[in-house]
Amino acid sequence: MFPAAVLEVPTAEDIELIELARRVIDANTDAGPDADGAHTMGAAVRAADGRMFAGVNLFHFTGGPCADLVALGAARTNGGRDITTIVAVGNHGRGVVGPCGRDRQVLFDYYPGIRVLLPTDQGVRAVAIEALMPFAAAWSMEGGVQQFDDERFH
């Protein structure tokens, strides 16, 4: 899946972030073990200053916000600007879940270099967002879609 050099073993801080996301979804899920619900994923982010922020998803057929985006919004609301790491966790012990395509693009565009915790065949590992977005075109509010930047992927 990924070259071994790209994957990092989670740090103690990463484990703490995973546990926060797990606690948040365990406390706020509205679905039984075999039921659908509006709140089935929790996410947590860490800012460069060490503060952690969390959120839960809000499922909706129109594409309601994923927990990842809610956690980013919670961070911003509370002064967290420089986000360094993100993780999402499923309810009922489903464990760490990698970000969906939309979330990957948002992370890539707004938080270059952010570390993403995700499940691998080696267990949970951390990876830079660029590893999840090969050949992506970056976007910014100022410049729109940018040309592919080969330097960003080395």
Image (spheres, helix red, strand yellow):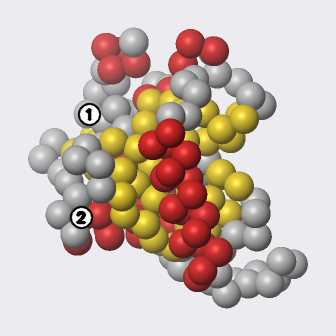
For the residues marked 2 and 1, what is the alpha-carbon distance in whole angstroms?
25 Å
Give the camera-side residue of 51 and 81: 51
Q: Cβ–Cβ below 8 Å for labels 2 and 1?
A: no
The answer to whether residue 125 of the structure is visible from this angle is: yes
Q: Position of residue 73 (x, y in %)?
A: 32, 67
Choose mark 2 or mark 1, whichever is in front. 2
132 shown above or below 21: above
Rendered image: mark on residue 146: 1
Quadrant where the C terminus sits is top left
* Residue type indicated by callout 2: Arg
How far across and how far down the image is residue 3, in percent?
63, 15
The dot on residue 59 is: none
Picture residue at 55% right of the left edge, 46% below the top: 15
Q: Nearer the viewer, residue 91 or 153?
A: 91
Q: To which quarter of the image does residue 117 belong?
A: top right
Q: Does 113 sit above or below residue 26?
A: above
Residue at 32% of width from left, 70% of height from top? 74
The N terminus: image quadrant: top right
Residue 132 is at least partly visible in this image:
no
Seen from this angle, which residue lies furthest front? 12
Give the secondary structure at mark 1.
loop
In this picture, residue 79 sits left or right of residue 2: left
Amino acid found under the numbered disc labelled 1: Gln
Does residue 1 appear to the left or right of 11 in the view shown?
A: right
Residue pointed to by mark 2: 76
Residue 137 vertical placement versus 58 (above, below): above
Q: Residue at x 54, y 72 (%)?
A: 24
Residue drawn 50% across the image and 67% down it: 67
